[in-house]
Image (cartoon, rainbow, N blue to C red):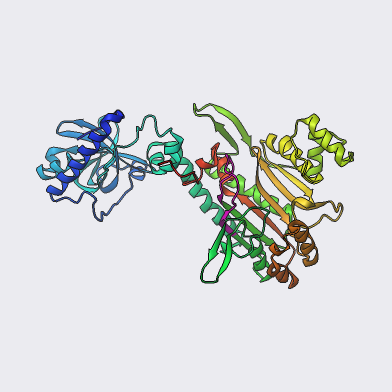
Amino acid sequence: MSDEKEPAPAEDIGTLLQVRREKMDKLRELGVDPFGQKFETTHAPGKLRENFEEEKKVSVAGRITALRDMGKSNFIDLSDLNGRIQIFINAKELGEEQWEVYKQLDIGDWLGVEGETFTTRTGEPSVKGQTITVLSKSLRPMPDKFHGVVDPQIKYRQRYLDLIANERSREIFQKRCQMVAEIRSYLGERDFMEVETPMLQDIPGGAAAQPFETRHNALSMDMYLRIAPELYLKRLLIGGFDKVFELNRSFRNEGISRRHNPEFTMLEAYWAYADFEQMADLVEDMICHLAEKYCGGLQIEHKNAEGEVTKTIDLSRPWKRAPYKDLVAEAAGSDWWDLTAEGRRNKCKELGVEISADMEDYEVSQQVFEKLVEENSINPVFVTHVSKELVPLAKQNTSDDSVVDVYELIINGAEISPGYSELNDPDVQRARLEEQAGEEIQKIDEDFLLALEYGMPSAGGIGIGIDRLIMMLTGAESIRDVVLFPQLKRAAG
């Protein structure tokens, strides 16, 4: 029996591995399968402790995460994602045969226990073990629970070790699962229908991004992993589905950074007869609902590794809404939109905003927006009426033909969600897509344009980057901390 209280030096790892394998062999000699069979439980460890009652017959299973060896009487902790329960193991209670089995166990092993609940003299909710069942022998020692997994390579490549050792990681991913389920419930309660659209597409559309390419052998054609589900969801609006959404995996063959992963989770939703203002209301309400239910309120604290609060995001309603041009003018100078294109380029030098020679004029303004407005916006702001060149799938504003009726929701220095009054004029849509495609006119989705000619109702649409949303709500500083298995460069050797 070993409690492995301290991490073993590297030269002792081989010895520990050998000892565990010897214990596995011993279990087999005793007629016990080291990797277990079916085991019926009445309670999970964390829930049993949370709703504890004395003198109750229980059957509980979990991983051994602590072991206090006091000779013929031992205490162990059985744990699951929701917590732990203490188990009292006594040689006399178990009997000679089961005691011998118990002596082959280590921290990290999975164990089933049947027994009766009681409270120790120190007030600890516990189970007096009467029979034990080995469910899986761990052949490698667990990470040091006091220091957790701190090496980022181990943290991301061996996420299971991170989840075993780091309570913070377990909490983030549990919240992610709960929030995604709640988003589905929230939209379902408002009569949105969840649908599934193709991940393999012959023409990737719905966004300007570099796709991943593949080959469909049976059809003898090149295909692409979708960059967005938008054009297929709009086909469903045309088909009469007036409220649809998809929680989807999309793929963009672009850079990896603190806020970008090539494979990501996105929510897209479309609401017939609505506009971008109604979609903004929907998103604001939904995010506040998630924060109040899973984050304890609308003040979202972000902390450093030492637990010190570094920033607080205030989600109190109503959220600020401001036109794109006004925000750029506030940051770059009230004369920004009165300057010539060359004047705006010169102003960028004064502002310290880097631009390239091949940027279009609207891209210069967008660079100013990203560097001086977006990156400095911590509390929520709906940036409305963006330049039409930036959003080719949105409806043009009737008062200013240089902008479209959209919002971009910025929180914590990043775009969390765009929302549109969707463009449904097939002729205008064709012109916009041709302008965006340039010489690569073959990349236009003619089937989508054909569908538009059958009539798409006026509609509002949204996209929400789920990974970024979870980052904001949990205080995670890297997208890799909210994606269970992020893309990584192949390990050397």
Residue at left 44%, top 37%? 153
Residue at left 89%, top 38%? 339
What range is drawn magenta here?
Answer: 246-264
Residue at left 72%, top 36%? 371
Q: Position of residue 116 (x, y in %)?
A: 23, 44
Image quadrant in which the C terminus is located = top left
Q: Is residue 197 visible?
A: no
Whether 488 is drawn above or below 392: the answer is above
Depth order, front residue of 36/240: 36
Task: Find the residue positioned furthest to the front.
Answer: 493
**Relative to residue 39, is residue 250 drawn left or right?**
right
Q: Position of residue 450 (x, y in %)?
A: 72, 71
Q: Is residue 247 magenta?
A: yes
Depth order, front residue of 363/148: 363
Q: Is residue 237 visible?
A: yes
Q: Position of residue 112 (x, y in %)?
A: 25, 47
Image quadrant in which the N terminus is located = top left
**Relative to residue 384, is residue 305 drawn left or right?**
left
Residue at left 39%, top 33%? 148
Q: Position of residue 374 (x, y in %)?
A: 70, 39
**Relative to residue 251, is residue 405 drawn left or right?**
right
Task: Find the residue positioned furthest to the bottom.
Answer: 454
Residue 473's image quarter? top right
